[in-house]
Amino acid sequence: MKLGVIEAATIQVNWARIGLGAMATIGTTTPADEENRRKLLDSVKKECRMLEAFSALGSHEYVLRVIDRDITILRNKIITPLDPLTSELDTSVVVERIKLPDYRNLLEYAKREMRHSNRDEFPKRRSQQAGRKKRKAQLHADTA
């Protein structure tokens, strides 16, 4: 049964072991100029060293996670070319990863929350499900 929940299966790579040891998070805001916004988004989509990109609410319009061999290359080849396309650019270099995503426990949490929200938000659906179970039980009893 397809629920559309899984978008992609991924693996966690130790990038430093294959020579990509400099990782940074970039927060940026674009000027009102639509042309620069389009250029920024095109650049983000094309650059393979930009691991992730998010549209955000808060102090930054976009948050990017980037990687390369060292900080100098990261600055010169990824961050500096973005500067003319933005009105603000803040960079934080990642020193150490503290936690990897724990998707299994997150899915368990989401499942528990869904059960609780279904009880609170969908009483009609619950009564419909109960009615179907009752009819199915009656049908099973009639055929036995």
Image: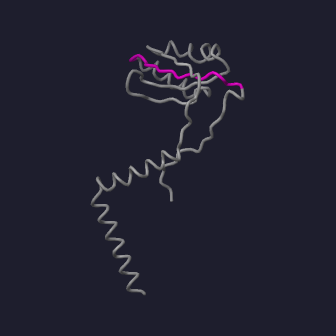
Where is 119 relative to 84, above or below?
Answer: below
Of residues 144 and 28, the one nearer the viewer is 144
30 left or right of 74 in image: left
Q: What residue do we see at 53% from left, 16% from top? A: 82
Placement of the C terminus among the 4 image quadrants: bottom left
Query: Where residue 143 sits: x, y (%)?
Result: 41, 86
Q: What residue do we see at 56% from left, 13% from top? A: 80
Q: What residue do we see at 59% from left, 14% from top? A: 75
Question: Is 24 colored magenta in this rendering?
Answer: yes
137 left or right of 93 in image: left
- The span shown in magenta is 19-32
Of residues 108 and 55, the one nearer the viewer is 108
Q: What residue do we see at 46% from left, 19% from top? A: 28
- Residue 33 sits in quarter: top left
124 left or right of 16 in image: left
Query: Where residue 79 sits: x, y (%)?
Result: 56, 16
- Residue 72 sits in quarter: top right
Where is 53 relative to 119, above or below?
Answer: above
Question: Is 136 colored magenta in this rendering?
Answer: no
Of residues 17 and 10, the one nearer the viewer is 17
Q: How many marks?
A: 0
Query: Where residue 103 sits: x, y (%)?
Result: 53, 44
Query: Where residue 133 sits: x, y (%)?
Result: 36, 72
